Amino acid sequence: MNLPPSPTAYSYVPSPCVGVCRMNDATGWCDGCLRTRGEIADWGKLVDRDKLMLWRRLTQRRKEGSAPVQWPDS
């Protein structure tokens, strides 16, 4: 019997990782993507709805000026 693919196997939500993987001790966030260690570790287990909610939090962190690194505009 074959099991169905995991809910994230066909995810259309891209990872927020920008390849700048350095944790900021002051904020507790990655300097590149602004995620916490827990958010980074959980990414692969999240369903698309939860990934989108995390993207909203990251966008808010950036808007509030908490971001040490500016993301490229898309």
Image (cartoon, helix red, strand yellow):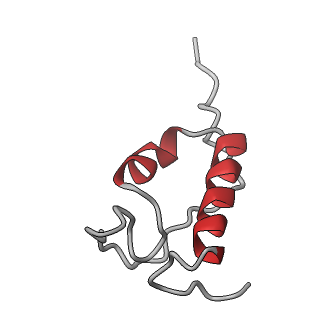
Report the number of numbered marks. 0
Q: Residue furthest top?
A: 1
Who is closer to the viewer here, 72 or 45?
72
- The quadrant holding residue 4 is top right
Q: Position of residue 22 (x, y in %)?
A: 30, 74
Q: Is residue 31 above or below residue 40?
A: below
Q: Is residue 41 above or below residue 25?
A: above
The residue depicted at 59 percent of the width and 63 percent of the height is 58
The residue depicted at 58 percent of the width and 68 percent of the height is 61
- The quadrant holding residue 2 is top right
Quadrant in the picture for the N terminus: top right
Specify whether 26 is left or right of 9.
Answer: left
Specify whether 22 is left or right of 19.
Answer: left
Who is closer to the viewer here, 69 or 7?
69
The residue depicted at 74 percent of the width and 84 percent of the height is 74
The residue depicted at 72 percent of the width and 54 percent of the height is 12
Q: Is residue 37 above or below residue 64?
A: above
Q: Position of residue 28 (x, y in %)?
A: 34, 61
Q: Is residue 44 above or below residue 14?
A: above
- The quadrant holding residue 26 is bottom left
